[in-house]
Amino acid sequence: MSVLVAIGTVKGLFLARSEDRRVWRVDEPVFGMSEVYSLCFDSGRLLAGLSNPVIGPTVAIGEDNGARWAEPGAAPIVFPEDTGASLERVWQITPGLDGRIFAGTQPSALFSSDDGGASFSMVRALWDHPHRPHWEAGFGGQAIHTILPHPADPARIIVAMSTGGVYRTEDGGASWEPSNTGVQATFLPDHYPEYGQCVHKVARDALHPERLYLQNHEGVYRSEDDGRTWTSIAEGLPGDFGFAVVAHPRRTGVLYTFPISASEEGRYPYDHRCRVYRSEDAGDTWRPLTEGLPTSPFYATVLRDAMCADTADPSGIYFGTRTGEVYASPDSGDTWYPVATHLPDICTLRTHPT
């Protein structure tokens, strides 16, 4: 199966191609002066959230899955004047069920597009939520980095932010409620507040959409009720800190994470070893996956959107590091092959079958 992997870095976008997901060819970069923090394949197009030091943050659209690029004539995402805010970065771009495109931004706001990403409108009810003045910035900024439309109901959407936590709507965004019961925030006086958690990423189970997986700032969790309540599934991991969590796209209960030490002095992989952890029972047990990965010592970090999966059978799993390495597994994590090395700091990965 031919696969295209879009690799967003702090210095441009790279496209990697493979016929067998073992041997890869990486194209020359585009947008070499831009940070690429978000990517989305949608109906034969590739949307990229760019931050350029001259023109600022924007969304570019690549036709034919990134073969030809065009930037909108006008800024596609603009904060309403009365908000007193301006766009700093596009952290997430996600297709919805009904043809819409959603974007999560810094500062924390949700936008939607009905014209394929050419222009976006703010989902005002989330911005006007009474909790918003209390949302704080994490080390990476104060941003919505996860958007999970329900696969069967376009009125149901889950978002997550750092910091602030998980919020959900059941009426298409007209109203929002916090959804963090059971998720800890050890940096706050109340360790289990209604909101304020530093959620790093949330993923939805492929076959049971009410089941969600959450990687928190200190904590790994599962929800069986569409995010209303959460239970820890960190036992069996070397630690509960990390950024990425990915659900297998074809098998229920299968998920992946890349644990990282929470130490403020390092935040390196535990024991300085490159290990992806997989669970095949929704987080009840975990197994390290290392075949083909670098041996110790290994110090690179995997960011929240720098891990993803493709929809082939068997599914491929991918991750990229802050030291510019990308690895691919064509067999759901059992064995790994290098895709690229010596790239700039990797922010995000997305895959598309070709």
Image (cartoon, rainbow, N blue to C red):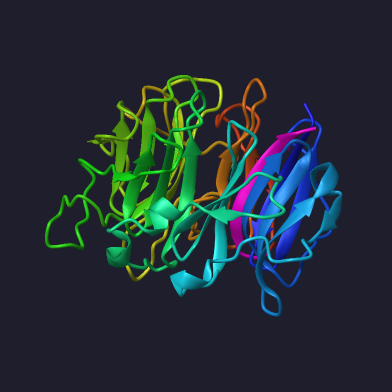
User: Would you say 353 lies left or right of 270 here?
Assistant: right
User: Magenta includes 350?
Assistant: yes
- Please say if 90 is above or below 103: below
Q: Residue at the spot x=60%, y=53% of the render?
A: 348
Image quadrant of residue 354? top right
On the image, the x and y values in percent for residue 185 come to: 22, 55
Camera-side residue of 322 and 15: 15
Whether 211 is among the magenta residues is: no
Q: Position of residue 226 (x, y in %)?
A: 35, 30
Image: 271 above or below 210: below
* Residue 159 x, y percent position in the rendering: 42, 46
Q: Nearer the viewer, residue 293 or 18?
A: 18
Span shown in magenta: 344-354
Residue 72 shown left or right of residue 151 in the figure: right
Give the side of residue 304 with respect to residue 47, left or right.
Answer: left
Snapshot quadrant of residue 90:
bottom right
Which residue is at 46% across, 38% downward? 172
Residue 213 vs residue 274: left or right? left
The residue under the point 63% across, 22% down is: 314
In the depicted view, which residue is nearer to us: 6 or 286?
Answer: 6
